[in-house]
Image (tube, grey):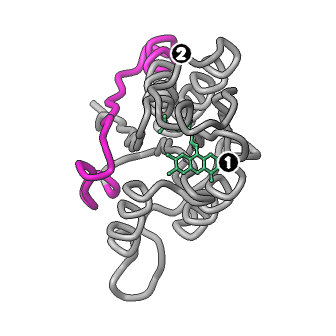
């Protein structure tokens, strides 16, 4: 029996949109594995729950978080800060997770581009392989009033849900195909 393939999905959310994004990514990954008839484990974790062990054990990655103040949100950024060098070898040989596939998405109000660029750069530092040309940005479509920004987000649109599922499916399929 080949070893069980694993995805690590780490997400942070303040008002729920990134949780919807992450859930759709997970659905896409599970559906892809089921279509391919291959077992797949998905660790679906908040940033504080994810360890260096999770990072090193995973065959592929999914990351989702909101843009806050033109940055990856604080809790998610702390995950990257705290775990980043844990995925590098002590002898300076470089990233221990190089070449593994990654899919990313950012929830935003009016922009999202800064967080997308930042997360993409972090993953390039790890030498991960992005499964999409660009990080998906899911705008919440709300007028950016204080009330709207701080309120729990309405369900995201069907198109966005499908795009998130596609990203999850792409990472899962890449991992499973490479295991054959
Ligand atoms: C403190 C704070 C800062 C924010 N900064 C930005 C920003 O820089 N750019 C942007 O497009 N949206 C910004 N937003 C809006 C959120 O990105 C948006 O509401 C997003 O949908 C939240 O995702 P979540 O529901 O997963 O927390 C900000 C929201 C908060 C609470």
Q: Residue at x 67, y 45 (%)?
A: 135
The answer to whether mark 1 is within 8 Å of ligand 1 is yes
Q: Residue 171 appears at what percent x and percent y?
A: 55, 36
Whether residue 82 appears in magenta in the rendering, the answer is no
> Given the current orientation, which residue lies at the most extreme front position?
146
Q: Which residue in the protein does label 1 denote?
A: 112
Q: Which residue in the protein does label 2 denote?
A: 155
Q: Residue at x 36, y 27 (%)?
A: 40
> Given the current orientation, which residue lies at the most extreme right position?
133
**Secondary structure at numbered mark 1:** loop
Q: Is residue 180 visible?
A: no
Q: Is residue 44 left or right of residue 11?
A: left
Mark 1, Cα crowd under 10 Å, few <14 / some 14-19 / many 20+, is many
Q: Residue 116 appears at what percent x and percent y?
A: 65, 52
Look at the picture and state if 138 lies above or below 78: above
Number of the label disc, if any, that sits on residue 90: none
């Amino acid at each position: 029996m080949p070893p069980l393939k694993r995805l690590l999905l780490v997400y942070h959310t303040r008002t729920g949109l990134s949780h919807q994004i992450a859930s759709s990514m997970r659905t896409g990954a599970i559906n892809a594995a089921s279509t391919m008839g291959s077992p797949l484990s998905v660790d679906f974790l908040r940033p504080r729950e994810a360890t260096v062990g999770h990072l090193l054990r995973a065959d592929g990655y999914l990351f989702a978080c909101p843009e806050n103040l033109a940055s990856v949100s604080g809790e998610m950024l702390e995950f990257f800060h705290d775990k980043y060098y844990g995925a590098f070898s002590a002898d300076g040989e470089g990233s221990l997770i190089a070449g593994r596939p990654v899919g990313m998405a950012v929830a935003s109000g009016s922009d999202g581009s800064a967080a997308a660029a930042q997360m993409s750069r972090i993953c390039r530092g790890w030498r991960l392989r992005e499964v999409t040309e660009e990080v998906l940005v899911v705008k919440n479509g709300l007028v950016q009033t204080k009330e709207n920004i701080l309120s729990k987000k309405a369900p995201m649109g069907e198109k966005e849900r499908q795009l998130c599922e596609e990203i999850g499916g792409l990472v899962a399929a890449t991992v499973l195909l490479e295991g054959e």
